[in-house]
Amino acid sequence: MTEIASEPQLGPAFASGPCSLHGRVEDFGCHECGARRTAICGILDDEQIVEMGRMMTQKWIEPGQFVVLEGDPGNHAYTVTEGVIKVFKSLVDGRVQITGFLLPGDFLGMPSRGQFMYSAEAVIRSRLCVFPRRPLQELFDSSPGLEKRLLEIVNDELTLAQDHMLLLGRRTADERVACFLLEFAGRFARAGWPVNPLTLPVGRGDIADYLGLSLETVSRSFSRLKKTGVLSLPNKRQVVILDKERLDELGGRA
Amino acid sequence: MTEIASEPQLGPAFASGPCSLHGRVEDFGCHECGARRTAICGILDDEQIVEMGRMMTQKWIEPGQFVVLEGDPGNHAYTVTEGVIKVFKSLVDGRVQITGFLLPGDFLGMPSRGQFMYSAEAVIRSRLCVFPRRPLQELFDSSPGLEKRLLEIVNDELTLAQDHMLLLGRRTADERVACFLLEFAGRFARAGWPVNPLTLPVGRGDIADYLGLSLETVSRSFSRLKKTGVLSLPNKRQVVILDKERLDELGGRA
DNA sequence: CGAGGTGTTGAATCACGTCAATCTATGTGG
DNA sequence: CCACATAGATTGACGTGATTCAACACCTCG
């Protein structure tokens, strides 16, 4: 369960570009994972990379298991190396809003006032690198360039969060689904994964919780996009984009 | 218009605590404005404070005027010293989502990849301190503690953004309005301003654009809260909180 | 007094949610 | 191999909360 086994469901990524939730570090100098080259790693010297490798441990987590719970003290930071993690907030009565999905290469671990203000849970079997806070913080303290980069990352996160607020507050169901597909197509493309057909890493329910809709509305929206020839759906988890122009139009990149 | 005149509509603030959009700096060492004491200023030495004062200029802007437009190069940073600024994103067809309101003491000025990814516009006559990017950046570079503080601020912003996503995606109209009132009551209290009655700094339309609702729905929600004895509304801009418990319940701090 | 900006209210409509039935794919055991 | 169970997705019928459109009330200002 915490073995360093194989059978990756969504392989290691070395994506560059914009972040998913809480900072795409692309690879956190996690040299045990075989992931080295990135914006952050470019800043660290070899010795520091080795140091990160030393403080780090790896673990596998099963679908439904939590990485962090809202309110947890931020004693660890994580990078995802395989799988999919959903980050979300919830209300007492069970309503949930997913604020982002973490894919391989993404970073999780900026607590606010010593606490995580959100929960994170594995969607599928996932592999994480775990860094204890204390030595990680020391590394950051000793490398101002790294701290600067982290600011940039969190700032990019904020930009994405603002985009998502616009989506949640003002877009229609079809537009939301189109945005979702474009977002994942973009992230997959940057990671070098196949984009057409696009293999959705999450089910309808999680898409709904991400887009602020009901599961049924998401399903209907998919059907509508299929009927109007924008998409085809070979199976539940795969999407072929037939009319990219129309999809962009719905996604309203503006 | 750019005079350092009087008639403040919402006076200088020295609030502490959580940030509004893009970093409450509480006071940016902007010593010309008479604002000195804050978390950030505690980090700067006297010489640096004087330096900030030297590079800074002040200006007044009128309601409806823009501070920044989406896409602007981030050549300046700003702190609000009087008034109210709305920060928002919009779609081509005119739909708008306000992502935050800036009150006195709040900071605006973290571009992403050299561009502001949002627009900011004065809601009422407002006073700003304007800092040219270059020397400000140099100041940050020379003070690692300051950079660290900035990271903390942006991270707090992100936490607020996630809360707002939950609101936009999953809360009912009444809950959204309750959250709005609680948020502003909190910010006002921290700034030392009267909270009961609470003087709303913005109109129904802007509240609607912040909460992802229509203007009419916001109005109806206010009426409903009034009819059920949660609030009384002496006039359009004032709110008396009668049943704080019920309001908290609606706001669902969880 | 009337004009214009802002907020409220009502009536009709609609997009989305809810509930429930059905379908499909996958897996299990006899 | 088939019967059966299970989980996820789809679809339909229906209900409802929020939007839209429109009328009206209120306040300030010329």
Image: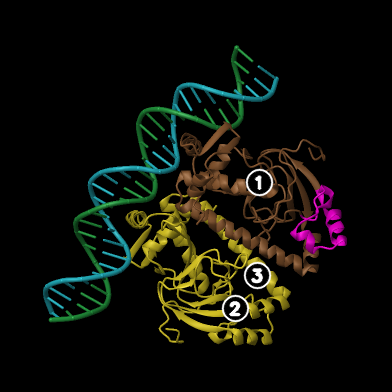
Chain colours: A yellow, B brown, C green, D cyan
For label 2, count other residues whose C-alpha is less than 10 Å away and answer few (under 14), some (14-19) or many (20+): many
Q: Residue A3 at what x, y percent from top left?
A: 45, 87
Determine the residue positioned at 58% across, 82% down: A30
- Give me the C-alpha separation between circle 3 and circle 2: 11 Å
> Disc 2 on helix, strand or loop?
loop
Residue A43 seen: no
Q: Is residue B57 left or right of residue A25?
A: right
The answer to whether dots 3 and 2 both sit on one chain is yes
Q: Is residue B182 above or below residue A203?
A: above
For label 1, count other residues whose C-alpha is less than 10 Å away and answer few (under 14), some (14-19) or many (20+): some
Q: Residue A226 at what x, y percent from top left?
A: 34, 57
Q: Residue A37 at what x, y percent from top left?
A: 60, 80
Amino acid type, mark 1:
Phe
The answer to whether dots 3 and 1 both sit on one chain is no
> Disc 1 on helix, strand or loop?
helix
- Give me the C-alpha separation between circle 2 and circle 1: 40 Å
Amino acid type, mark 3:
Leu
Q: Is residue C8 left or right of residue B12?
A: left
Front residue of this view, candidates A79 and A69:
A69
Marks 2 and 1 in Cβ contact (< 8 Å): no
Q: Which of the two discs, 2 and 1, sits closer to the camera? A: 1
- Give me the C-alpha separation between circle 3 and circle 1: 31 Å
Chain letter of disc 2? A
On-image quarter of the N terminus of chain B:
top right
Query: Which residue position is annotated with label 2?
Result: A28
Query: Which residue position is annotated with label 1?
Result: B188
Front residue of this view, candidates A247 and B219:
B219
What segment is highlighted magenta in the picture? Answer: B28-57
Amino acid type, mark 2:
Phe
Q: Is residue B34 magenta?
A: yes
Chain letter of disc 3? A
Query: Which residue position is annotated with label 3?
Result: A150
